[in-house]
Image (cartoon, rainbow, N blue to C red):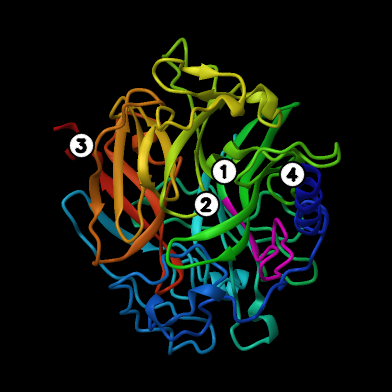
Amino acid sequence: MRRRLAQCVRITLVGALATSASVLALSHGAGPADAAPCGNGGFGSSSLDTGSLGSSGSSGSSGSSGSSGSSDIPNIGPQGPLVPFVGANTRTIGWVTGPLSSNRTFSRFGISGTDLGVSWDNGSGQTLMAFGDTFGNCNVAGQQWRHNVLLRTTDDQLSDGIRVPDGVAGDPRSGTVIAPGQPNFAQQLIPSLGVANIEVTTIPTAAISLPHGSGHRQYINYMSVRSWGTAGNWVTNFSAIAYSDDNGQTWQTDRSTIRINAPISLALPADLPSVEYNNGKFQQGAYVRGRADSPEEKDYIYQFGTPNGRFGAAFLARFKPEDILSLDRYQYWAGNTRRWVDDITEIPDDGSAIVVPAPVTELSVAWSPYLNKYVMLDGDNEISLRTADHPEGPWSARTTLVPPGLVVLYGPMMLPQSPALQGDSKDLYFNASRWSDYNVMLLKTDLSRMRR
């Protein structure tokens, strides 16, 4: 029986991996043309068939309608004017993406709709932002579909928005990776099969830059999505790390970092990574460097992990920067009694290894010198903040930044150039996505209110 199971799993994985993002170079536009909210006229997520969506957006959320649509610029998706929000500690600043943003990403980069905007410092004066499923002109075959795109900026004055310079073909410092022969079109980074129930998309969930050779190497941790389910539910094939040595121009998946998602533990042939039950705890994630003033934490990068979807708990791994691609050198939090263990198989399944209880959504984690604490953002239809003195916690109760039902946001991603993450300043900036407009906006939080 075990041999038959091994053969079955291997066949399934070969279908998903041997022709997947790690070994195929598919052109942009792969995947079904209807797998996006392209042209939904701003009716919001409640009108969409979540089974066919090519996005991790919070589909099915109440209160998500209300976008007026982009009727003044036809055939480029559902984006409406920015919904103003001024709360007790947080306010909207402006659209980062979309035809109505100050960046005019449709005319300049062929991006009329996208989400997430995972942000990180590239180590040489730029902030890089990786976005999820992306579409362009809704009136052409394939809707100019891409599974992920990248924008770059040197803008560190965020009070009036974030500005992305023009993309220049072949220029790794320009505003985006320009597709060959298409001067105003952002190229897809990590391809996907775009085939339902095998691999519908590849979505960045975390990213970091680390020293490599004489410069810096960029790393993106992404998930391979097999299928979409009901609101906040999706199934992954695996998570993996892709890296770039040319500032995001080209990416290569390191096959040894693939964490196959399966509810079993099983050894496979040498050409495929083993199937380990606890891999399911690290299908999505967030990276954060350990605080510099802690003798124990300063030498590590911490990776928070969650299962696929928005209903799991958060777990924790750590590794030395030079070991990011060597999963066998990672350590895993096993709870207050055992603390760190050297093998993912040793993570206990009794709840003691959980660092943040369910439900946890897409995460962003950073160290804030202003608060002298680690800061964690997450949210599905609302945005919340937690703090802790150490990555393993204990993490505080949620502080609401954006309440549910008002702006209806998900996927908050902190901007590394935020003053609150650079020094003793109260202003924290982050990207967040609005499903009904299917675009990313910039928000600012006043952390002085968290010191009370």
Residue 335: where, in percent of width, then height?
Answer: 42, 22
Residue 59: where, in percent of width, then height?
Answer: 42, 70
Between marks 2 and 1, how big is the CA–CA gap? 7 Å
Residue under numbered circle 1: 280
Q: Amino acid type of disc 1? A: Gly
Between marks 1 and 4, how big is the CA–CA gap? 31 Å
Front residue of 93 and 64: 64
Q: Nearer the viewer, mark 2 or mark 4?
A: 2
Between marks 3 and 2, how big is the CA–CA gap? 30 Å
Find out whether the residues at labels 2 and 1 contact each other: C-beta distance under 8 Å. Answer: yes
Q: Earlier in the sequence, mark 3 or mark 4?
A: 4
Q: Earlier in the sequence, mark 1 or mark 4?
A: 4
Residue under numbered circle 3: 450
Front residue of 384 and 51: 51
Q: Which mark is residue 308?
A: 2
Span shown in magenta: 188-204
